[in-house]
Image: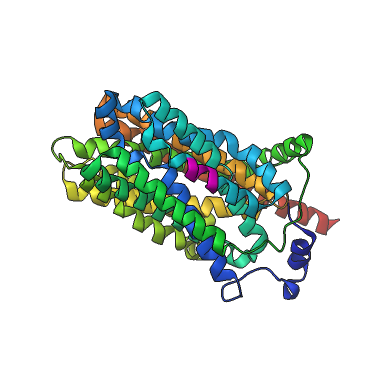
């Protein structure tokens, strides 16, 4: 919920005391949220690169092992909205700190799971704990950063997500090759613990936050308001569809690369996630893309890049597969940064709930993508996973085209209204 000072700053830009690049505290805030994003994504997807090894130890199919990822993202999706309400009452900084602390503690227990059922259960708890971070972080930025700098700030947070996802998978891959998948998960837990400490040391106190109440009726009203907004609803669907593609591809890619004709070892498969660096660049550049192409233009570019990567990855040449992953990653992170920042700018009240709904849709897409991608891979190989991704990409195009049509229709209706009013 925006504070009185935030509203005043919107009305009188000269009196805006929110952070901007170069202002005291902006760099500390940026590094703190970068560290938080790194820890969150390293933990959330820590088992993804290890799925073939987990399948081998527990005698599980790809779809069964994929639940170690889907349970975490699904629990996050279900818990993000209620925990966002706590952030409205107790503060974004407090919620982000508690979320990371619990997730790290569970992360240090995950390597000792005795069977697949316990592993899935612990991962679900970990995902639920992490639910307090993303929506609170987006709301924190929306309240503490000037609007013109918001997309860049959120892009940097998303970049931390991509670095976390990459480093977590690389660390687990090489540690698993040397000492087993449990050692890989322990290494990620320790890395996330360090990142969480860095976050707490650097994150500045909120200056534009006004505590709200834990009122279920107010929460339900805010949710209804956001879901009734056509633009926000389209952004939620776009986030879910983008993440369906990404979740499917990166849940299954380890199985594909472990099989013929590639037959890559676990450490090398983990290193494939270096392509996440491309996501770091594309998410950080989202603000410039929107400035040049507009929001819809940037989304179309992200969609086209993702679709091209999916098609290219069908080749049985390792170079083509890697290049396909580069394009998929670049397109996904650019699209996610544009959609998530658009949510923060569109919502004028209940920003934490607006961001929470986006994150809920986003991680439901991840959970669905991981499970459906594994099922599609089992049924039709990599081509089945690619087909699922292309269907989701087509969905993003359809939603964006509908938004463009609706905007043109509304503009024509407004022009007619103004002409009629002028003639009276």
Pick the residue in front: 109 or 31. Answer: 109
Q: Residue 133 in the image: x percent, y percent?
A: 56, 48
Is 220 situated left or right of 260 in this image?
Answer: right
Query: Left of 169 or right of it: where is 226?
Result: right
The answer to whether 300 is drawn above or below residue 75 in the figure is: below
In this view, 43 is above or below 424? above
> What's the image's color scheme?
rainbow
Residue in the image at 76% along x and 35% along y: 216
Q: Is residue 103 magenta?
A: yes
Task: Pinpoint residue 402: horizontal percent, then vertical percent.
Answer: 55, 42
**Where residue 339 sits: x, y (%)?**
53, 50
Q: Quadrant of residue 13?
A: bottom right
Residue 296 seen in render:
no
Dominant secondary structure of the residues highlighted in magenta in the image: helix
- Which quadrant of the rendered structure holds the C terminus? bottom right
Q: Residue furthest right?
A: 424
Q: How many marks?
A: 0
In the image, what residue occupies the spot 67% across and 59% down? 143
Q: Residue at x 50, y 38 (%)?
A: 127
Q: Tell which of 419 and 185 is nearer to you.
A: 185
Residue 232 lies in quadrant: top right
Residue at the limit of the structure toward the left, as seen here: 261
Residue 397: x %, y % from top left: 46, 43
Direction from residue 348 to residue 337 in the image, left or right: left
Stretch in magenta: 100-105
| Residue 96 as seen in the image, left or right of residue 372 | right
Residue 323 visible, this angle: yes
In the image, what residue occupies the spot 78% across and 38% down? 215
Above or below for 218 versus 41 = above
């Amino acid at each position: 919920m925006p504070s009185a000072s935030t509203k005043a700053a919107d009305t009188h830009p000269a009196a805006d005391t929110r952070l901007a690049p170069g202002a005291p505290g902006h760099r500390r805030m940026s590094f703190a949220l970068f560290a938080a994003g790194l820890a969150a994504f390293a933990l959330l997807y820590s088992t993804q690169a290890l799925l073939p090894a987990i399948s081998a130890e527990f005698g599980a199919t790809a779809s069964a092992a994929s639940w170690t990822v889907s349970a975490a993202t699904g629990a996050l999706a279900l818990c993000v909205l209620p925990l966002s309400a706590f952030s409205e009452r107790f503060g974004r900084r407090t919620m982000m700190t508690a979320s990371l602390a619990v997730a790290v503690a569970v992360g240090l227990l995950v390597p000792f799971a005795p069977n697949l059922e316990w592993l899935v259960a612990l991962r679900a708890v970990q995902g639920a704990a992490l639910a307090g971070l993303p929506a609170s972080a987006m709301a924190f930025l929306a309240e503490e950063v000037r609007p013109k700098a918001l997309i860049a700030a959120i892009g940097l947070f998303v970049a931390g997500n991509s670095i976390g996802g990459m480093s977590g998978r690389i660390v687990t891959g090489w540690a698993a090759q040397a000492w087993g998948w449990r050692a890989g998960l322990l290494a990620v837990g320790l890395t996330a613990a360090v990142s969480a400490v860095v976050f707490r040391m650097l994150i500045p106190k909120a200056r534009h936050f006004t505590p709200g109440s834990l009122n279920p009726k107010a929460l339900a009203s805010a949710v209804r308001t956001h879901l009734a907004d056509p633009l926000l609803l389209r952004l939620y669907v776009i986030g879910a569809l983008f993440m369906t593609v990404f979740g499917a591809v990166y849940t299954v890619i380890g199985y594909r690369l472990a099989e013929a004709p590639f037959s890559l070892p676990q450490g090398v498969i983990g290193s494939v996630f270096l392509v996440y660096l491309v996501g770091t660049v594309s998410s950080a550049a989202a603000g410039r893309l929107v400035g040049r192409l507009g929001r819809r233009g940037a989304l179309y570019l992200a969609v086209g890049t993702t679709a091209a990567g999916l098609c290219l990855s069908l080749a049985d040449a390792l170079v083509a597969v890697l290049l396909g992953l580069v394009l998929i990653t670049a397109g996904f992170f650019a699209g996610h940064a544009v959609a998530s920042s658009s949510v923060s700018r569109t919502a004028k009240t209940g920003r934490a709930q607006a961001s929470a709904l986006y994150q809920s849709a986003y991680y439901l897409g991840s959970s669905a993508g991981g499970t459906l991608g594994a099922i599609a891979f089992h049924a039709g190989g990599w081509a089945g996973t690619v087909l699922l991704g292309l269907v989701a990409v087509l969905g993003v195009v359809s939603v964006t085209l509908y938004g463009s049509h609706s905007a043109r229709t509304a503009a024509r209706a407004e022009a007619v209204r103004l002409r009629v009013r002028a003639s009276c």
